[in-house]
Image (cartoon, helix red, strand yellow):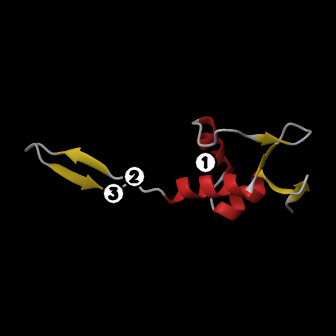
Amino acid sequence: MPIEIGGQTYYRTNEACAKIGIGRATLFRWLKAGILEKRFKDRRGWGIFTEDDLKKIGAEAKRIQVQYVVTGDGNEKHRPS
């Protein structure tokens, strides 16, 4: 259940992952890579996330990365991820 602090709604890690549809390991990897400019923590030091945070993380989850490989003849071909 989200918590409210000073009129702002915050989501715990599990809630954020469930709402976005990603796993905890993925979230932590993206956080380590710097997907968010600033992070919030509760009094225990556990990460909490705002609605804006969830939108940024959700945008990353929907981002598509196209990979290409160079074949022996020098042509590029799309390789599905």
Circle 2/circle 1 CB separation < 8 Å: no
Question: In terms of image quadrants, where is residue 14?
Answer: bottom right
Q: Amino acid at mark 2?
A: Gln
Q: Which residue bears the numbered disc 3?
A: 80
- Report the residue that reaches farthest toward the left: 73
Q: Indicate which disc, 2 or 1, sits on the residue closer to the N terminus.
A: 1
Image quarter of the C terminus: bottom left
Q: Position of residue 26 (x, y in %)?
A: 61, 48
Q: Which residue is mark 2?
A: 65
Of the image marks 3 and 1, the number of the one nearer the N terminus: 1
Q: Are marks 3 and 1 in contact (CB under 8 Å)?
A: no
Q: CA distance from mark 2 to mark 3?
A: 9 Å
* Rendered view: 52 above or below 40: below
The image quadrant that residue 36 belongs to is: top right
Image spot of residue 67 (x, y percent): 32, 49
Residue at image location 64% in from the left, 47% down from the top:
27
Q: Which residue was labeled with disc 1?
A: 26
Q: Nearer the viewer, residue 63 or 14?
A: 63
Amino acid type at image mark 1: Thr
The N terminus: image quadrant: bottom right
